[in-house]
Image (cartoon, grey):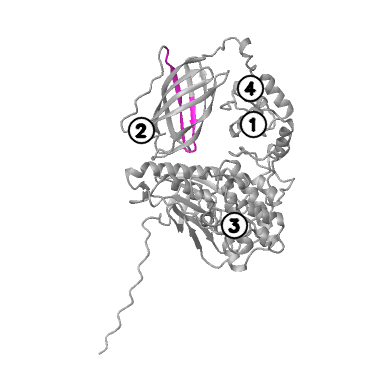
Amino acid sequence: MPTAAPPPIAAPTRVDYVALPAGTLIGRYQVAGVLGQGGFGITYLARDTQLGRDVAVKEYLPAALAVRPDGNSVLPRSTEVADDFGWGRSRFIEEGRTLANLHEAPSIVKVFDFLEANGTAYIVMELLRGRTLESQVKAAGPLAPAGLQAMLSPLLAGLQKVHDTGFLHRDIKPANIMLGADGSPTLIDFGAARAAMADRTKPMTAIFTPGYAAPEQFTSAKQGPWTDIYGLSATLHHAITGRAPPSAFDRLMEDTYQSLAGVAPQGFDVRLLSGIDAGLSLPLEQRPSSIAAWRTLLGDQPADDAPTLVMASPRRSPPAAPAASRRSTARRGWLALGAGLVLLAAAGAYVTFAPALTPQVEPTASPSAEATQAPSAEAAEAALALSTEDRRRIQLALTAQGFDTRGSDGAFGPRSREMIAAWQQAQKHPATGYLTAAESQALRDASPPPPRPAGDRPAAPMAIGGFFAGSLSGSATGGGAAPLAPMEVDLRLAGQQLTGRIVHPTCGSLPVSLMVDSAGTVSGSLRLPEAAACTNNIASASGRVAGSTLTLDLRGADVRYRGTLSSQPGRSPGNPAPPSGTRTDMP
């Protein structure tokens, strides 16, 4: 008698022991599922329980550094990587904070919220619907000239706003540009925090996409706006030709790149092609140093009537002729690509594709009076042709009135612009951050008198010599899990020179040489260790000598040390002994 066939074995239910289960609340956001996972974290589909909308929530959970042992909490894998985990979390939060402040920038993924919970951090973003530029080119072929220009202008405007905050994307490629139904682009998956983690932490592997990463991303060369320009140039090359240019690493060995201007694809402006070629130059010195400069080469002229956001100046000085940013007028459309959610994950990048839904229209805020006046205000200040001495006197006047510019070097950097705007607000003037002729004259008139010639100058009221010692407390930029160990400082003031050394508890002694002006303002730069391997990076120094005290504020890319030193009368400068375990091989 034949026996009945055994019942089929049921497929095992997939259980993800790392991701948060559906239904978990992260603040007010309820997890609905996992959109994707990568080496840097997990991205969830979630529901905003207060506003009733779907969002994407990215969780900081670097697999090389952290685990979720049970429940919802995230912990470092070991005590050896705890500092790196905390440092990376601070950078992740800083990235979320930066992007949240760019809510009005065109073509940049919107960040609605960022929060800390479960021992880690989360960034809440808009849930984008559409397809990537990579998918679009693969499905329909290279873009037509009109389609490329429609995509390029808002991308340039948005990226310029990002750079104005001193922030970089560091991972621009076709897979990180989303296109709406009307072709409007959105730049997603900022890689700055992930790249910074790879730079600092050995367990984290730096991930670059061949063909789109700039040469300096393979080396220790300085990165800046020119790095993103290379990535966007390579992306435009892909959009025009259907393929990426040769890898920068390969080009360093043998450059086989064929210039677009030489190939001359039909229908494209030669200025655009030549500008892309310039952006793909291997030596960073030969690339445009800013988006504003690059737009001129590309022949992309921003709309004159576009409102402009007022932000800090970029860390790298822009060209003399500033370009106003274009604001995209196209609204993001929704593109149906079938049922369900489809994941595109590349080195921690998560993009969601979903069925067509009723679009959630964000209210558009009217630009402020200050914002609309920014282009003319900047041009008006440029027309004043202020000299370095004029700017220095303005900085001294601002500081004397309580708007501390942290130095008087005659260069209006981000801090000076912030203080100018704060002073203007206090005067009930439009807070543009740029000076009118009347404001410039008023501040110069209020500036402390310049020092007299040496033979005609009485003794300065401040101490012109002496020794100062003490300690500076440290913290990671953007906050951190725990404060850094303090550094001991031993300095000598002689005239306008402040020299000596600081002693890092692990990395040893480092030299100090700063300037002190006649008002007692300290300024200059030095090198600080910013990683466990005692890698030195440039840091700015500011402070003030006042009687028997010296305040110092040292700011690096990732760390900050500050404190007040006391005068040490009747002693000569010593060389404090390094603490136990200190490295002695530092330059």
Is 561 colored magenta in this rendering?
Answer: yes
The residue pinned by badge 1 equals 421
Q: Is residue 230 left or right of residue 481?
A: right
Q: Earlier in the sequence, mark 2 or mark 3?
A: 3
How far is disc 3 from disc 1 in space, using C-alphas? 37 Å
Please rate how many residues cluster around mark 1, counting C-alpha atoms within 10 Å: few if below 14, some from 14 to 19, many from 20: many
- Closer to viewer: mark 3 or mark 4: 3
Tell me the amino acid under the disc marked 4.
Ala
Local secondary structure at mark 1: helix
Q: Earlier in the sequence, mark 3 or mark 4?
A: 3
Residue 578 in the image, given as x and y percentages of width and height: 35, 28
Q: Residue at x 55, y 68 (%)?
A: 338
The residue pinned by badge 4 equals 397
Is 416 colored magenta in this rendering?
Answer: no
The answer to whether mark 4 and mark 1 are in CB contact below 8 A is no
Where are the magenta residues, as a range? 552-569
Q: Nearer the viewer, residue 580 or 545?
A: 580
> Does residue 462 lie above or below 583 as drawn?
above
Q: Toward which corner of the image does residue 393 lie, by quadrant?
A: top right
Q: Residue at x 44, y 28 (%)?
A: 511
- Closer to viewer: mark 1 or mark 2: 2
Quarter of the C terminus within the rendering: top left
The answer to whether mark 4 and mark 2 are in CB contact below 8 A is no
